[in-house]
């Protein structure tokens, strides 16, 4: 049996994509934490007068790591709404996506 998706609710799509993208943003947290710690050690080993303090580098990287899921969630929400609205507009002209279900 074939069914056609004619409309996607933009707010619901935005909420779902916001949560999914927020969870994907959590995957970057360990990498930013490791980059902050590694950057702090590299700068400490160089002892350059012009270098940014190691604690500042580590703090910025950790801060970005903790903000990344929030930033991803916000943009996932916004682009979920925009994507659903574009889909709804194009589905009016083309008829939507056809899926086969049992």
Image (tube, rainbow, N blue to C red):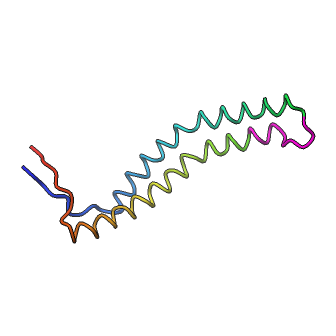
Quadrant of the image for the C terminus? top left
Q: In percent of the image, x 56 and y 38: which residue is there? A: 28
Going by the picture, which residue comes out furthest to the right?
A: 49
Q: Is residue 51 above or below residue 97?
A: above
**57 lies left or right of 95:** right
Quarter holding residue 55: top right
Quarter holding residue 32: top right
Was residue 50 drawn as part of the magenta stretch in this picture? yes
Q: Is residue 36 above or below residue 78?
A: above
Quarter holding residue 60: top right
From the top left corner, tell me how far across and down residue 22 is, in percent.
48, 46
Q: In percent of the image, x 45 and y 61: which residue is there? A: 78
From the top left corner, tell me how far across and down residue 36 is, in percent.
71, 36
**84 lies left or right of 93:** right
Q: In percent of the image, x 16 and y 51: which residue is there? A: 99
Q: In percent of the image, x 57 and y 46: which residue is there? A: 68
**9 lies left or right of 5:** right
Relative depth, front residue between 93 and 8? 93
Going by the picture, which residue comes out furthest to the left?
A: 1
Q: What stretch of residues is rendered in magenta?
A: 48-58
Relative depth, front residue between 15 and 79? 79
From the top left corner, tell me how far across and down residue 45 is, in percent.
85, 28
């Amino acid at each position: 049996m074939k069914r056609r998706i004619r409309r996607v609710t933009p707010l619901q799509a935005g909420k779902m994509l916001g949560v999914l993208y927020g969870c994907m943003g959590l995957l970057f947290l360990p990498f930013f934490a490791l980059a902050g710690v590694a950057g702090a050690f590299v700068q400490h080993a160089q002892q350059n007068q012009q270098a940014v303090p190691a604690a500042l580098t580590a703090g910025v990287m950790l801060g970005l790591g903790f903000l990344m899921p929030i930033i991803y969630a916000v943009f996932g929400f916004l682009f979920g709404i925009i994507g659903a609205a574009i889909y709804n507009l194009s589905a009016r002209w083309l008829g939507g996506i056809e899926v086969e279900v049992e």
